[in-house]
Structures are given as C-alpha cells and as structure tokens.
Image (cartoon, grey):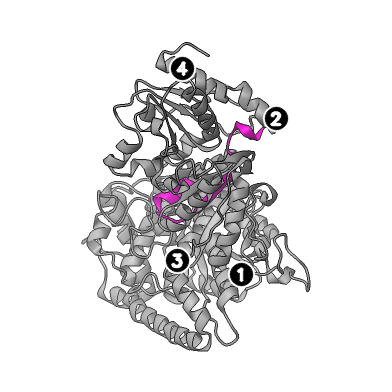
Amino acid sequence: MREPNLDELAINTIRFLSVDAVQRANSGHPGLPMGAAAMAYVLWTRFLRHSPSNPTWPDRDRFVLSAGHGSMLLYSLLHLSGYDLSLEQIKRFREWGSQTPGHPEYHLTPGVEATTGPLGQGIANAVGMAIAEAHLAARFNRPGHEIIDHRTYVIASDGDMMEGVQAEASSLAGHLKLGKLIVLYDSNHVSLSGTTSLTFTENVGARFASYGWHVQSVDDGNDLAAVDKALRVAQETLERPSLLVVRTIIGFGAPHKQGTFQAHGSPLGPDEVRAAKQNLGWPVEPPFLIPDEVRASFHSAIERGKTLEQDWRRRLSAYTAAFPELGSELARRLAGELPLRWDADLPVFAADSKGVATRKASEATLQVLASRLPELIGGSADLDESTYTWLKGEGDFEPPSLSKAGVQGAAGGVWSYAGRNIHFGVREHAMGAAVNGLAYHGGLIPFGSTFLTFSDYMRPPVRLSALSRLGSIWVYTHDSVGIGEDGPTHQPVEHFIALRAIPELLFIRPADANETVWAWRVAIGNRNRPTVLALTRQAVPTLDRSVYGSAEGLTRGAYVLNVRSESSRQPDIILIATGSEVQLIVTAEGRLAARGVKVRLVSMPCGELFEEQTPEYRESVLPSSVTTRLAVEAGRSLGWERWVGPGGAIIALDRYGASAPGDVVMKELGFTADRVVREAETLLGLPAT
C-alpha cells in the first residue's frame, strides 16, 4: 500500500479530528469538514496570512466560515495551526463552558472572526469586512506604504447560497468591486433534508457572474493543485470579488453515508466512523490522533505568522515616521480607542414648543460626531433623505473605477473607497450583516439606518450584534404610528417590545432633541454593545431644561423630569413615557396640578439602562411607596406591567395603525393629553373633569 504523503495525512487529520469530536459529542455536522477539508487545507497552509500567536494582528487576512454548522472544520484548523485552542477543548465540542460551541462564536474562541450559524450571515459579514479593508486602505495607505493590505476569505455552503441575505450582500459586493473578497463555495449538492435538487437547481456561478463577480469552477475539491491554481487566480483578480465553485463530496470517505444527507447533521455513528477511517487508511484507534509530522507542519504557521506580523510592524514604524499624524490616528483606531473630547460641544437645543423631529436632531448631532470621529461610517437602505443619516461632505463609498473628475456623490465628495457614506440600496438584511462585518473588522464605528418597521428585515443581524458584543449602531426613524399617511405597513407597533426582547441590546427612544444628543453619546460610548436609536419623523417639543431635568438623565435609562417641582417629591401619581409621548405627560401634569394632584414625570428612554442602575437609583425614580402609576407609549403594552405594577395602568397600542395625517392617527388612537388626564383621574378615584 502506498504511504500517504504529508498533504494527505494533514487533510485526513482535519477530517478525523472533526469526526471524532462530533462523535464524542454525539451531536454536530461531520459531513462538511470531511468534504471541505482539502480546500480548507490549501487555503490555510498556502494562502491565509494569519498569526496564531496573535489572532488580532490588524493586517491579518480574515477567514469566515459562513457554513457555521461545520464548525469543527474551523476548530480543527485553529488547533492544528497553533491557536490557543487545546485538544481538550476539541474533545469538549458542544459541552457546557467549552470554547468549541456548536457554531462559531466571536469573543469566545481565539481565531474566530465572526459569529456564524444562521446561514448567509457569514458571507454578508465578510462583505462588510472587505468594505472595511478597502476603506481603511484608501484612508491610510500612501505610495510606498501599503499598511492596510489583506483579504477576506469565506467558505460558504449550499445553504448559504439559498439564503436571501447572501444574495443581497453578494449583489452589493459585486457592485462595489470588492476584489479582495474571495468565497469558496462548498458545492456538495446536499442540505439537511436531502439533495439540493429537491429545491435548489439554479446556476450559482452564473448568478454571481451577473452580480459582477469573477467566477471559477473546481471540479474536484480534493484536487489540491486545482484549488491552489484557482486561489492564485482569485488573488490576482483585484477588480472583482471572486467565487470559487468547488465541487465536493459531503462526508467524503464514509463509505455508506458520503454524498448523502445522512452525513450532514448527525454523527456518523461508531461503525461508520470505523469504516471511514479504514477506507481512508487512517488508524481506527486512538481517536483524536494527530501525527507528529502533521502537527509540526501545521505549527509552521506560528513562526510564519510572527514573521508576517513583525514585517508589518516594521513597515508600520516606517509609515508612522513618514506620516506621524496618520500613524497616530491609525493606532488609535485599531486599538478601538475614542479620541479625547470626542463628545465635546455637541449640539444643545433651546426650549421650543414646536420643537424638531428627533431624526433631525440626530442629523445635527451626527454631523458634529463625524467631524470628531473619522472612524464613523455607515449608511441607509436607500433612505438617506428620510433617515437623515448622511455624513455631509464625507464622500460616498463607491468603486474608484466609477469616479470621474468633479463627479459628486449624494453626500458630497468624489466617489472612492475613502468615502464614509455607504449606499446599501434596498437591502436591509444585507446592510445589517455588513455593518456587523465592519464592526468585526475593527478600526471603524459603523451604523445602518432604515425605518423602524423594517427592523423586522434586520432582526438576525441585530440579534447577532448583541450576541457578538459588537458596537453596531442601528438608527431607526419613523418610530411610531405618528408617521401618519404611510399607514400600518410602515407604522411600527410591536417593534419596541420585539427589540427590547433581545438581550444586551440597548433600545433608546429619546423624548426630544437634547435626549437624542445624549442617546448618540451612549451609542458611541458603547463599543462592545449594540444600540438602537428609535427616532421620530414628526416634530416633538424641545423641553425647557431649566424647568425639567437634564437630558443627561438618559444615560441612566430613566429619570425624573420635573425634579425641580415640589409636587414631584411626594407624588400622588407617577406618569411615565418614552419618545414622542413624553410631551403628553408633560401637558397632563399642568392640568392635573390645577386639581391639586401631585405628579412625578418620568422619561424612560431606555429600560435596559434603567434596569442596570443600582436599586437605590431605581427606587429614587420609581419609589415603591407610590403604586399609582400610568405609562404612555405608542407601542404594544407588553412589558410595561413591570414598571407600573398592579396598581397602575398603561396607555399603549395593541392594534395596528391607520393611514391618515400623523396627528389625526395619534388622536384617533387615544394618544392625547386629554386621555392621559382621564386615565390618571380614574386611577386616583377623582371625578372626571
């Protein structure tokens, strides 16, 4: 029998580390690691520029396993390459407290670049990473000093290619000509329920070609030379992103299950594991075998990575010497540090009974922040003129090939990768995942914007931003039925509670312009936690802060508005509201005071922040001795019972809205100061006025 060469030994080591881990866990997906091991081996040992001893080296190539169900492929590669992921952790695959969860999780496992699992998200994250690399290179590189120069690689599955978010993101990547994005499509023609011919018969390569991608086909994923050649061509193709359609066999080597859905989502079983090892000439025992020569070969990545990083740091030193201001700025951004006084002299809005829409207050704040934070970058889902999230004069992120002398983008400035305004198009789902990719990459503070009702399209990436502890900022305008004529399809009702239900996500609904400024301070300050800003289309009064409490109270989630009022100190009733409904309780206070009622007003823009305050602070705002409470919000009532208690009441919206002018809709649905007064009188047992 022919002795296997080192490449074959290494590839089978990847396969059987994965198979043994899945078998021990009695849970997982062995088929993808077995089928994709060869192309992953070629990528990781011949092309990927990474440093196992420093997984966060800034100019490393990014690798995203979009097919997150095949996580053992990634864990095997990380362990073998010398990352801080022990063999014991491989053996504890899918166990409580391990670093090898069922799907890869950012921040948990060294070397994992993105939390993947929900299919399509990873490839869309990678589009954001490629945008980040192109933007930082355009901002910082100078002739002879290519200090930002890396690629983003993806392994994606048939399932990824079926998901709509992948189509949205890939279309955008093709338009943007992201030539340093390379996707290896593990085309094994099998999904969890059967062969893909049951549901998926499109020509994926032709679709990507129509997006503007460079497409190659590799007929045999075990043909190392063919994979190598295709990757080299992809690296040389800088004017378009690249797709390699690699034909593989799921569960390769398992004689009875390879090529079938039985190898997809379940352990092979002891008999089939034994048969697969015998079939590929691998020792049946012991499990988790790593031949010495394979370990030594893979571990060469450690020194190679150190050399790559040291060379980059030498070049960075030369760059910083030649361009000290740019070097200092790049170092700050890559470290994730905010500049001194970044939030100094933000807008302060004078009291105004007519006021301004909080989306407009956000726009004014955003422009000042953009001047202080060059890392602030983002855009909208084709809604710049409605969400007011453009960064004026900062240019549009577009392919340099589209630039023409004197051509102005929508936000001013020539088109180039240096532009800070990203036009995502009508692609909310891809926008969310790409914004997360920008955050994963580092060096940037990304935001994405659309109408609040369309946050439904974005729920997976918003949830993943919270799970991954990303500082993504979600700017949602048109935040209630108060938007008016667009009608119930565009009027959010259940969205407040839906977003509040996501753990670790801050949902902030500011009451006026000054609360909006503080909301942005909170969002920027949270670099390891995502924030939603829910902003009005309609104007809302700007409160007189000489009468009412400082808007800085927003940073604590809830605060007493009429803190200077004697009647609020020992109140008969507490009125609580968020957003545009705060104006209703403010108006109601005066009318109730005329009847001798002592009222405390509480603005609660962010319940999550309020929950995190000390019990003493929460008690100071909502004293347990005052059980007569009334909450007002133009959204679902669910959740408010916590704050009003058994003795309170809620004015909320447990139905859909209607198409009419916004003030008419609010009035007809009962969001008026008159109703607040009536409900308060009822709670207090007073005769109606």
Distance CA(mark 2)–CA(mark 3): 42 Å
Say which mark, if any, is on residue 661: 2
Q: Earlier in the sequence, mark 1 or mark 2?
A: 1
Q: Position of residue 633 (x, y in %)?
A: 50, 30
Looking at the rendering, the stretch of residues picked out in magenta corresponds to: 462-484
Location of residue 641 (image quadrant)? top left
Examine the rendered structure and indicate whether residue 582 appears above or below residue 424.
above
> Which amino acid, mark 2?
Pro
Q: Earlier in the sequence, mark 3 or mark 1?
A: 1
Say which mark, if any, is on residue 338: 3
Q: Classify the position of the N terminus by image quarter.
A: bottom left
Going 44% across and 46% down the picture, which residue do you hit?
Answer: 554
Distance CA(mark 2)–CA(mark 4): 29 Å
Going 70% across and 30% down the picture, which residue do you hit?
Answer: 661
Q: What is the crowding at mark 3: few (fewer than 14 residues within 10 Å), some, or many (at least 20)?
A: some
Q: Nearer the viewer, residue 455 or 98?
A: 455
Q: Position of residue 509 (x, y in %)?
A: 50, 41
Q: Marks 3 and 1: CB-CB under 8 Å?
A: no
Residue at the disc numbered 1: 179
Q: What is the crowding at mark 2: few (fewer than 14 residues within 10 Å), some, or many (at least 20)?
A: some
Examine the rendered structure and indicate whether residue 641 appears above or below residue 82.
above
Q: Nearer the viewer, mark 2 or mark 4?
A: 4
> Which amino acid, mark 4?
Glu
Residue at the disc numbered 4: 681
In this image, 602 relative to 353: left or right? left
> Which amino acid, mark 3?
Leu
Q: Position of residue 251 (x, y in %)?
A: 41, 54
